[in-house]
Amino acid sequence: MHMQFRDKSIDDSSSGDSPTLLESDRTESTTPLPRKPIPRKGHTKSRRGCFNCKRRRIKCSERHPECNHCLKAGLQCEYPANILHATQRSLISPHPQEVANLRSTPGIFNARDMHLFHHFLITAYPHIPVGADKIWVAVIPSFAHNYEYLIHSILALAASHLDAVSTSSVAEQAIQHRILAVKSLNDALSTPPKTGVERDARMAAALALAFQSSHLQDGLAEFLTMIRGCNLIAGDQASLGSDSAFYAFREDRHLQDMRNRIGTANHININPTDLDLATLSLHALSNLPMSACEHTYQETLLLIVKNAYSHPVKTYTTFVHLYNLPSQWTHDDFQAFIHADNAVAQILLAHFIAIQALLTPILYLERVGFHGVDAPTRVLAWIEGVYVNVPGRLRRHVQWPREVSRYPFTRFLGQGSGGIAQGHEQFDSGAVVMGS
């Protein structure tokens, strides 16, 4: 997967404008049409289940505040937290049965944890900010031990990465560290950061968790949540001053670096036939009832595809804007957008993943000079999850993204039209490029 974290951070406001997309390129949202309830066909997977059920790989009843399994087993039921709604914090001490399985004592780590930490430093760290490996292998580790949520985020990503590139069976460790990281980060976000280093620690943790989400089978909603979290934690551009570890994420740094890379690239070839098919598939969604946020998201996807024919710099800039877009929405609008029962939004997100894959010749330039190791991700596989989850009468709208998810990787690199092959995941997240 190719994941990209978009460099411009935006406050949690539905009225904020992103400077990464010119005003002339915006499409005004139309008044949303009233949406009729869409009966949902039952499915066998729980996509918004609690952490205990995810860790045990069993179906969760998704009952709040406690699911049926946790209630019966006497466990503390915890759902994937929305780290963005920082005003609603109420963390409860873990149930004694859980303490036996999940270590939460700051600074106490075993040999397996040290192995994961080493793996992170050598191969598993994120590839962004572009050209700034030192941030992850030297700067962040220098203060990671001071923040429980950060060290567990690092170990979570390292475990998921190691599980993807080797025969090591560390998937359960990855989930355990993720649970501890999210709980601790939620607790920290209940108060403003006291120092710039603390803000950087929160940003690094959210970014590491976003990259890890790309390795999770049902990680789409959590991925989007963590990316939005990165934007909201960073705040405005002033928060990313020269003393910040993430100074390279400033608009005048990240976008300029990528403009230079794109401008000096020998050849960027995106298959025009694929872009034609993307345009047709996106336009076919216009008759579906959409909210204002969904309509804007669709229009931005169309603009990305339009630019991709011959304007790679505009394509990348608009794609960055797309990653920032959910940060401009209200909390309720964002939650409605990522909900698994929102079939229209799920279809739009399937198109987002497919289009991201088509942009591989551009997005791959983020990895120039990256010394880590790209691991297979689940990003393209999320499209199949969307296809299975949406009502049968709407599945035709996921057909094009589904076909893209089966393309051979060489097709994304512009090396031929290729046929349909069984699911190759692209090089990893970048975050995020996710999903190529």
Image (cartoon, rainbow, N blue to C red):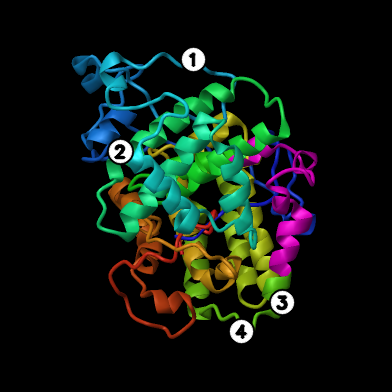
- Establish if 54 lies above or below 431: above
Image height of 158 relative to 416, above or below: above
Q: How far apart are the two marked residues, 1 and 3, measured between alpha carbons?
A: 49 Å
Residue 22 visible? The answer is no
Q: Hey, what amino acid is under mark 1?
A: Ser
Amino acid found under the numbered disc labelled 4: His
Q: Which residue position holds label 4?
A: 267
**Crowding at mark 4 (Cα within 10 Å: few <14, some 14-19, many 20+):** few
What type is the residue that disc 2 sits on? Arg
Mark 1 lies on residue: 90
**Disc nearest the viewer among 2 and 3:** 3
Task: Say if the magenta span includes residue 76.
Answer: no
Name which of mark 4 and mark 2 comes first in the sequence.
2
Instruction: Determine the secondary structure under disc 2.
Output: loop
Question: Is 79 or 342 nearer to us in this picture?
Answer: 79
Mark 2 vs mark 1: in front: 1
Q: Which residue is mark 3?
A: 263
Real-space CA distance between mark 4 and mark 1, rounded to the nearest whole angstrom:
52 Å
User: Would you call the spot at circle 1 few (<14 residues within 10 Å), some (14-19), or many (20 or more)?
Assistant: few
Residue 236 as seen in the image, left or right of residue 149: right
Q: Which residues are magenta?
A: 230-259
